[in-house]
């Protein structure tokens, strides 16, 4: 019996050693912000590699802060997918906008998306003016449907608004996402693994099914 107990204890510590984090492990929280229909949920699903956020052309579908979890060997990024920021005309709309902005205050990095086809709207300028530029990354999404010249103009405009880091991506086709992920990872601080490596979201299956 003693040998059996020792074997169990040895197996436990051996497993703990296998699953222990590297000394340079990093982690952090990223809020995904932007106007409705710029592709926030599509981006989240593409980066995580799982369909955890609903994707639709209908505006204001995401009403909750859906958490997506990306775990790699040396880091873990926890994403908050927020409701689209718009001009609210109802109590629900005001609540959704408040939810989006409150998420930005609780995270280490803010990732804002803009629509390459529509361009940088007045609403986008207003959102950018309210965000902490030191924690801000802007991604120009849907780059697959406009010319390089238009993308370059968008990038120059964003830089004139004080945005230092701009990425050009297509979340639909996963173009530019590896570079974006590397940038996010480079900004993380040393930290623990908040969720198990095989966990992609903290939302219950029933909620995801309803989404």
Image: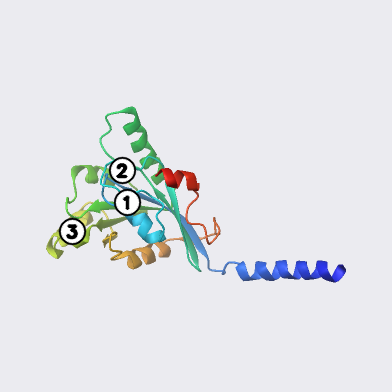
Colouring style: rainbow
Q: Is residue 176 above or below residue 204?
A: below
Instruction: Give the mark nearer the N terminus: 3 vs 2.
Output: 2
Q: Residue furthest right?
A: 1
Instruction: Please tell me the numbered disc located at residue 40.
Output: 1
Where does label 2 land, which residue? 84
- Which class describes the residues within 10 Å of circle 3: few (<14), some (14-19), or many (20+)? few
Is residue 133 in view? no
Position in image of residue 104 (x %, y %) = 39, 46
Left or right: 36 as drawn, with respect to 203? left
Q: Spatial distance from mark 3 to mark 2, Cα to Cα?
A: 24 Å
Determine which quarter of the picture holds residue 177.
bottom left
Position in image of residue 198 (x %, y %) = 52, 61
Callouts 2 and 1 close, C-beta under 8 Å: yes
Where does label 3 land, which residue? 156
| Quadrant position of the C terminus in the picture | top left
């Amino acid at each position: 019996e003693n040998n059996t107990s020792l074997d169990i204890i040895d197996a436990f510590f051996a497993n703990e050693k296998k699953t222990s984090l590297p000394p340079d492990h990093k982690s952090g929280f990223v809020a995904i912000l932007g106007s409705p229909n710029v592709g926030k949920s599509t981006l989240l699903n593409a980066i995580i590699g799982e369909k955890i956020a609903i994707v639709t052309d209908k505006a204001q579908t995401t009403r909750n802060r859906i958490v997506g979890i990306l775990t790699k060997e040396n880091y873990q990024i926890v994403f908050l997918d927020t409701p689209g920021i718009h001009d609210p005309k109802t109590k629900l709309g005001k609540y959704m906008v408040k939810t989006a902005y409150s998420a930005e205050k609780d995270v280490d990095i803010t990732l804002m998306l803009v629509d390459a086809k529509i361009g940088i709207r007045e609403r986008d300028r207003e959102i950018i003016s309210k965000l902490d530029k030191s924690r801000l990354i802007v991604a120009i999404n849907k780059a697959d449907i406009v010319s390089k010249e238009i993308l370059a103009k968008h990038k120059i405009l964003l830089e004139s608004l004080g945005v230092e880091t701009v990425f050009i991506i297509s979340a639909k086709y996963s173009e530019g996402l590896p570079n974006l992920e590397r940038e996010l990872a480079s900004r993380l601080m040393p930290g623990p693994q908040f969720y198990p490596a095989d966990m992609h979201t903290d939302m219950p299956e029933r909620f995801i099914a309803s989404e």
